[in-house]
Image: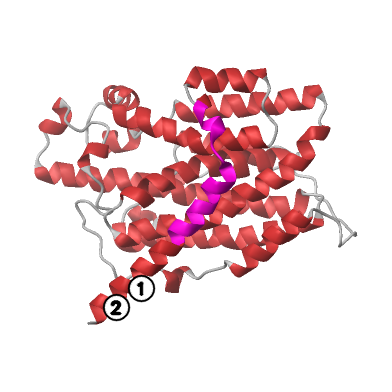
Amino acid sequence: MSTHRLYALPVDITEWKFDGATEIMFNWEYDDGSDALLDLYDKGKKQQWDASTRLDWSLDLDPDNPMQLKDEAISIYDTDYWRKMSSEERGWLRRHLQANSISQFMHGEQGALIATAKIVGTVPDMNAKFYAATQVMDEARHVEAYKRLLHEKFELAYPINKALKTLLEQTLSDRRWDMTYLGMQVLIEGLALAAFQSIRDKAGNTLAGAVNAYVMQDEARHVSFGRLALREYYPGLSDAERDEREEFVVEALYFMRDRFNQSEVWERLGLPADVLDAIHYNSKQMNSFRGRLFSRVVPTVKDIGLWGERVRKAFADMGVMDYARIDVTEQLANDGRVAEEFDKKMFVEKAIAAE
């Protein structure tokens, strides 16, 4: 059955094609590569999971607040626009805002699926090819999980937004294997981890929280994959090559920081999108969220060695340099521990329901 009926905007005017130029790399040295990447590959094999069985899809979502998030998290909360809304309109707004966010997660995961499949073919290190193959399966599972959450529980979805579309196209259309790593494994995955965490830690609905927790467990390995590969490769770059990559990082992060909006939702509600986008951008909720976004990216960019004057100045201008002190290894390890805690919580809830 076609899922076009679930989309708040027509799919046929938002899907797109572009030339994902690439250079395929065969490697006949099968013992070639980093031992650390081989260890990560072993970990990736052991941590495969089934979205159909690990998650309890029998759990229901409240149509008026599917993920049970607090209204205070909505950027227009307590404004004149919010106060004038009826309870029905507020319920509609909660559902559509949440569906739009999860939709961008789903589309981003499809981008990651395509990017990682490309990495398998382009990366020269055999052990990196091994790990990337496990990530392809991870990304397919993530698309599946978010698709089921939207199509079966929300019964609503939004097409990809322009900002994410642009960043994905820039990442996937570059021929150089390390630029795919940098754009996807470091920037997009890093930004996504912060967004996933916001829902994982704040959702009152167990299913919604668990989907994000389990995806984050995988994504922590994916960011580690990018760190290991680029940390070994970037010291050998020329000054011009390093400068080009640092420029890409800075431009991409400014672009994403300034374009997180919900225009499609405001327009669907018949509200002035320009006015509400301005309220949204300047709200304390979005200021806090933008800060959290960089908590994942800043320490990783520093770790892989893209830490020239241009990057440091940009992070200082954004007010996020303090995140450079974060122990990224511990941060990612904690994502795995939280996922395991959700496993225990799901088990307990099933036991109580059985009783």
Query: Is 199 left, or right, of 234 in this rendering?
Result: left
Q: Are marks 1 and 2 in contact (CB under 8 Å)?
A: yes
* Residue 351, numbered circle: 2
Instruction: State the image coordinates of residue 114 (x, y, percent, origin top left).
Output: 62, 51
Q: Which residue is mark 1?
A: 347
* Residue 43, numbered circle: none
Secondary structure beneath disc 2?
helix
Residue numbers of the magenta segment: 322-339
For image coordinates 59% across by 25% down, the residue present is 250
- Mainly helix, strand or loop, the magenta region? helix
Secondary structure beneath disc 1?
helix
- Residue found farthest to the bottom: 355
Q: Is residue 333 magenta?
A: yes
Mark-to-mark CA distance, 1 and 2? 6 Å
- Residue 100 vertical position relative to residue 217 in the rendered view, above or below: above
- Residue 155 vertical position relative to residue 183 in the rendered view, above or below: below
Q: Is residue 224 magenta?
A: no
Local crowd at mark 2 within 10 Å, few (<14), some, or many (≥20)?
Answer: few
Residue 93 at least partly seen: yes
In the rendered image, the quadrant that contains the N terminus is bottom left
For image coordinates 50% across by 57% down, the residue present is 336
The amino acid on which the numbered mark 1 sits, given as a three-letter code, is: Phe
Local crowd at mark 1 within 10 Å, few (<14), some, or many (≥20)?
Answer: some
Instruction: State the image coordinates of residue 170 (x, y, percent, origin top left).
Output: 62, 35
In front: 184, or 162? 184
Residue 146 at least partly seen: no
Instruction: State the image coordinates of residue 186 (x, y, percent, origin top left).
Output: 61, 40
For image coordinates 62% across by 38% down, the residue present is 183
Colouring scheme, one of rainbow, by chain, secondary structure, one colour = secondary structure
Query: Is 66 left, or right, of 160 in this rendering?
Result: left
In front: 10, or 128? 128
